[in-house]
Image (cartoon, helix red, strand yellow):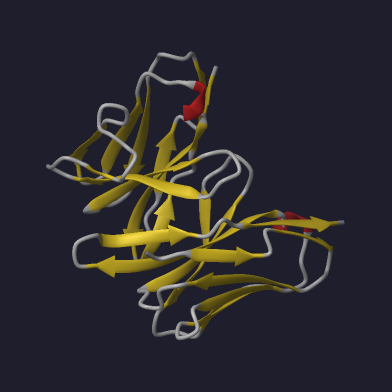
Amino acid sequence: SAVISQKPSRDICQRGTSLTIQCQVDSQVTMMFWYRQQPGQSLTLIATANQGSEATYESGFVIDKFPISRPNLTFSTLTVSNMSPEDSSIYLCSVLRGGYTFGSGTRLTVV
Amino acid sequence: KQEVTQIPAALSVPEGENLVLNCSFTDSAIYNLQWFRQDPGKGLTSLLLIQSSQREQTSGRLNASLDKSSGRSTLYIAASQPGDSATYLCAVLNFGETSGSRLTFGEGTQLTVNP
């Protein structure tokens, strides 16, 4: 299985600001996935990031709010833009190699 | 649309007890099923992966079974320990012609093992 390094592990941000989350994979993968886990809930897919093309967003998520970069086959970033307290969640990246492997998560609190 | 249900939502047991967590899914055309563990505020750790052609997988004190035709999986934890306290998530993977890979999670079972 792949090994994913995700950072930051946590952050407390002011409303109206933006935070960029990074994920580095130890091997090349075609697709990377970004998930959100709101307090007390399960995981919801935000978007799928493919190298060299625009990310594919799920219903309810838009590029202006969650821009994603995928500059190469081992790296991706997710930005949470113009944050509000409702964006307080754990954000996770993931890759599919056999089974799914997840990063360690970014715990975001917006105040 | 795939739906995954986990029962119970929460479970509290004394140390040493054997326990079973349940997962059911509505669309049996799955590619595989994974059980994850999540500690509070952390990411997911994969525990066991069962391919659709398999019936069970074992790792240490953990055993996961899969009955694809009935849409059910169980995670058996033997001789539970306080360190097993966490949320356990079941997820199934489907492949669609237009949607590609789709991983659907259950809501999780929050397990507490009391010393």
Q: Which residue is drawn at 77% across and 74% down?
A: B18
Q: Is residue A107 shown to the viewer in this render?
A: no
- Quarter of the rendering occupied by the C terminus of chain B: bottom right
User: Residue A52 lies in what quarter of the image?
Assistant: top left
User: Residue B8 lies in what quarter of the image?
Assistant: bottom right
Q: Residue at x 34, y 68 (%)?
A: B94
Q: Where A16 sits versus A54, above or below? A: above
Q: Where B33 sits versus B88, above or below? A: below
Residue A106 x %, y %: 48, 34
Q: Which residue is drawn at 33% across and 28% down?
A: A79
- Quarter of the rendering occupied by the N terminus of chain B: bottom left
Q: Where A33 sits versus B89, above or below? A: above
User: Residue B114 lies in what quarter of the image?
Assistant: bottom right
Residue B14 x %, y %: 86, 63
* Frontmost residue, B103 versus B85: B103
Q: Is residue A39 shown to the viewer in this render?
A: yes
Residue B89 x %, y %: 56, 59
Residue A109 x %, y %: 54, 25
Q: Which residue is drawn at 28% across and 34% down?
A: A62
* Frontmost residue, B109 versus B45: B109
Q: Where A47 sits versus A79, above or below? A: below
Q: In this view, does B63 lie to the left or right of A102?
A: right
